[in-house]
Amino acid sequence: MPRTEFIATGFHVPERVVTNDDLATMMDTSDEWISQRSGIKTRHWVSDGETGATLAREAAHQALARAGMKPADLDCIVYCTCTPDHFEPGNGVFLERELGLRDVPALDVRNQCSGFVYGLSVADAWIRAGQYRRVLLVGAEVHSRGLDRTTRGRDTTVLFGDGAGVAILGPTDDPRRGVLSTHLYADGRHAEKLWVDAPGLAHDPYISEELIRAGKHRAVMDGREVFKFASVLMPQSVATALKANGLSPADLKLLVPHQANLRIMEMVQKTIGLRDDQIYMNIQKYGNTTAASIPIALHEALCEGRLGRGDLLVLTAFGSGFTWASAAIRW
Ligand code: UT7
């Protein structure tokens, strides 16, 4: 059975940069609070005309160019997002249309911050089974239009950013390389600790002025609980990924964690016992872009030469659900 390799990556963020000082003009917050609690300095927000699908299209074209491929060479799209452009259908078909494709399957993955690793697990299974040979795996989010830009929403609004990251995946016959394993987890007991209640068909009607007035269409988060679980479960998922492959932290060239919070990533680093050069962090520039954060970080790490052929890469994610996941990859 072949393994799954990363053929090329790409990313795209909107041009508009929003600084912590910009946010302080909209709500009662400060650069000091945001920097100290999250490490974030800037994030990107979409402007008129930009959507999740257009961000993903730009990232996909970049990856295709790096791979020397055309959109027609793709035979499947796996699109991970928790901020779809529309309630229905999912964003996969909108991206397919943006890329000028027809007849290519488009799967939508709704696993929030863990979306990219969940999507990777599905794409990897399909590729190893021989069902698809060229899979475009996408993590793309537009948070900014859903954020409450008043003081009421400050605990979440300052954290999230917009962006897209993609990877083109395909089979390799080199037994030493490719995706070694993926591990996925979920615990729905914590579903309401980070969620957007409405619109939702649990409500009748599923959207109403009352729901909007109550702010039910905004992301609501129990930040401390998210922090607590993320700091424990992300290192645990990395340990599982290493153990499953008979490896140890010393073997790790690079850990690319979901960029949720600089302090969470520092806890992950400390718990596993990694040197600074073994973990990649770019949350300072982009904020938390949920499903897009890992592919954006991976692309930047590659551009900076932090990962070479044969190196061990581990991905780990944690987010709303709670869901969490890890992947071990021999580059
Ligand atoms: O992908 C997963 C996504 N989510 C996360 O990763 C979030 C994980 N959690 C966190 O990162 C942290 O819990 C936060 C950064 C969200 C918050 O940090 P914290 O140290 O847990 O602060 P807190 O929620 O306990 O709030 C402390 C104070 C409160 O004021 P009082 O009650 O002490 O007077 C908040 O009202 O900070 C206040 N506060 C703010 N102040 C200035 C909350 N948000 C802000 C803000 N600016 N943006």
Image: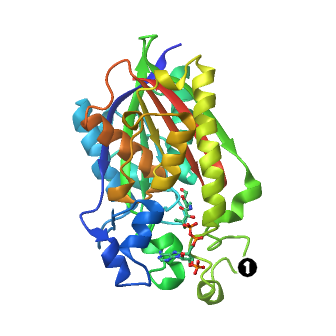
Q: Residue at x 31, y 24 (%)?
A: 308
How many numbered marks are there? 1
Query: In screen coordinates, is 91 left or right of 232?
Result: left
Query: Which residue appears at 47% of the width and 21% of the height?
Result: 251
Give the vertical position of 90 relative to 172 (above or below). Answer: below
Furthest toward the right, the residue is 189
Q: Classify 10 Å Cα crowding around label 1: few (below 14), some (14-19), many (20 and above).
A: few
Give coordinates of residue 112: x percent, y percent: 55, 54
Left or right of 17: which side holds 244?
Answer: right
Quadrant where the C terminus lies? Answer: top left
Can residue 158 be seen in this snapshot?
yes
Q: Which residue is mark 1?
A: 204
- Using the image as rendered, state which of residue 223 and residue 110 is in the foreground: 223
Quadrant in which residue 174 is drawn? top left
Disc 1 is placed on an element classified as: loop
Q: Position of residue 255 (x, y in %)?
A: 45, 35
Query: Where does the image place residue 129, in percent across and percent down from the top left?
Result: 56, 21
* Residue at 32% in and 57% down: 285
* The residue carrying mark 1 has its beta carbon less than 8 Å from ligand 1: no
Residue 67 appears in which quarter of the rendering? Answer: top left
Left or right: residue 261 compared with residue 236: left
* Ligand 1 occupies quarter: bottom right
Residue 108 showing in the rendered view: no
Render colour scheme = rainbow
> Is residue 124 positioned above or below 287 on the image?
above
What type is the residue that disc 1 sits on? Answer: Asp
Q: Residue 206, image x and y in percent?
A: 67, 76
